[in-house]
Image: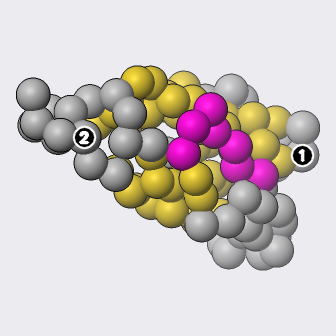
Amino acid sequence: MAPLMWLTRTMTATAADAAGHLVADGWTIGFSATGGDFTAYAPTTVSGVATVTYTAPAVASTYSVTATSGGKTGSADITVADAAVGWSVAVSAGSEELVVG
């Protein structure tokens, strides 16, 4: 088995109101995860999108990344495998207002 590597990816959360309009610049979106680290845990939006860099642990497992704003959440499961396999992201939106990808 190849050694595990630190895996870093850009993640975004898009926030919109009930009518589908993107929120104003400066809206805070909180990020959390069951493992790993972010460049920012509460970035603000630009054109409705908040962006962070997520670094997954170098331990093969599945980690859940969640973005929360305005009482709405969206999540993505991050599966870390060995270096030969890589990793994958399965996105499951918790609401129509907030999507993580």
User: Does the segment drawn in magenta span residue 8?
Assistant: no
Point 45% across, 60% down: residue: 10
Point 59% across, 58% down: residue: 38
Q: Amino acid at mark 1?
A: Gly
Position of the N terminus by quadrant: top left
Q: Secondary structure at mark 2?
A: loop
Q: Is residue 96 in view from this perspective?
A: no
Q: Secondary structure at mark 1?
A: loop
Distance from Cα at disc 2 to Cα at disc 1: 36 Å
Query: Horizontally, is 44 left or right of 55 in the view?
Result: right
Point 40% across, 56% down: residue: 9
Point 78% across, 43% down: residue: 68
Query: Horizontally, is 24 left or right of 92 in the view?
Result: right
Sequence-wise, the earlier of marks 2 and 1 is 2
Residue identifier under label 1: 70
Query: Nearest the camera: 85 or 89?
Result: 85
Give the x, y percent position of residue 30: 77, 52
Residue identifier under label 2: 4
Res 72 quadrant in image: top right
Query: Nearest the camera: 3 or 26?
Result: 3
Q: Amino acid at mark 2?
A: Leu
Give the x, y percent position of residue 87: 28, 36
Residue span colored magenta: 30-36
